Amino acid sequence: MHVIKLEADGRGIDGLIADKLRTRGLTVTTGAEKPATVDALVTYKDKWMWDITMYMLELTITIREPKTDFPLGTGNSFHTSLTRKSPTEMVDEVIENIFKQGK
Amino acid sequence: MKTLIQRTSWVVASILVLQLAGCASPASHEGMTPEAVAVSKKHPYSVSVETKGGSETGAMDSSNISNADLKKAIESSIVKSSLFKNVVQGKNGDYDLTVSVTSMSKPTFGMSFTVEMETAWSLNKRSDSSVAMRKVIKSSHTATMSDSVVGVTRLQLAVEGAARANIAQGLKAISELDL
């Protein structure tokens, strides 16, 4: 698998996603470029808000077919300030949800 | 006494207006149905439509697209454009069309609201389960202050516009297939 790093991502969300996937026994790389040979691509969109401190409001992760970009699985997590979670927890939640769908 | 009643009425009316203006409405199937879809070919088959990935609009939520409304909008568009001979319910069609909303980016505040939407369209032939089309469709729509000064309505219009464009692109892609 390869996690495509967003250009604007200065928080290393791609690394968190890759680490989480590695805990499931997968071989994962990250980077802005699309590698030629890979079984699946992982893309993500994160949305941040300010409330005393910055927090991640929403995270969407999509696993795609490398040739066509067709989504094979997608997951989303949305938490407002009152139920805010750390980026690591958000990544955990989304990845777990994606793999639950596949079962 | 009359002034007090008038003032109270104004306060109650103002609260009602504020509440109505503050509640988000879901994207409607009418709003998501394109006026006209330019189809290059019409297919003499029946189709069933399934939608996934949509979500209901909660009381404190912003405008979302429900699976039921997206399904209705796609079905209406197919009927209007005569892309397929007819639309059937359940798994009784010659083809199964599945549309999944994979992402929708909505702004939180601003003057112009641009919504970006991505869907995955999959068309399968029922008789042999072959894949006729698998395509990612990306669309966006911007609603401005001239569309509506009320923020929640402006966002709803942007969501509906993005869905309209998405459906039009998806159906156009299907019309270009040799089924």
Image (spheres, rainbow, N blue to C red):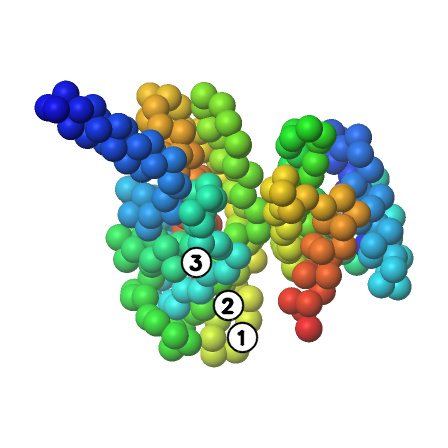
Residue at the (38%, 35%) spot, across then down: B22
Determine if residue B15 is in view.
Answer: yes
Q: Residue B154, image x and y in percent?
A: 38, 31
Quadrant in the picture for the N terminus of chain B: top left
Mark 2 residue element: strand
Query: Which of the two labelled residues, at mark 3 and mark 2, occupies the earlier sequence position?
Result: 3
Give the answer, above or below, for where B67 lies relative to B94: above
Label 1: how many Cα within 10 Å (few below 14, some 14–19, many 20+): few
Same-chain check, marks 3 and 1: yes
Closer to viewer: mark 3 or mark 1: 3
Query: Which of the two labelled residues, at mark 3 and mark 1, occupies the earlier sequence position?
Result: 3
Closer to viewer: mark 3 or mark 2: 3
Q: Nearer the viewer, residue B120 or A6?
A: A6
Relative horizontal placement of residue A66, taking residue B82 as reference (left or right): right
Relative horizontal placement of residue A18, taking residue B90 as reference (left or right): right
Q: Amino acid at mark 1?
A: Ser
Question: Which residue position is annotated with label 2?
Answer: B124
Residue at the (30%, 55%) spot, across then down: B76
Same-chain check, marks 3 and 2: yes
Label 2: how many Cα within 10 Å (few below 14, some 14–19, many 20+): some
Residue at the (49%, 23%) spot, across then down: B110
Q: Residue B43, image x and y in percent?
A: 36, 62
Quadrant in the picture for the C terminus of chain B: bottom left
Determine if residue B78 is in view.
Answer: no
Q: Amino acid at mark 2?
A: Asn
Give the answer, above or below, for where B111 lies relative to B133: above
Question: Which residue position is annotated with label 3?
Answer: B67
Query: Which of the two labelled residues, at mark 1 and mark 2, occupies the earlier sequence position?
Result: 2
Question: Which residue position is annotated with label 1?
Answer: B129
Relative horizontal placement of residue B81, taking residue B173 as reference (left or right): left
Mark 2 belongs to chain:
B
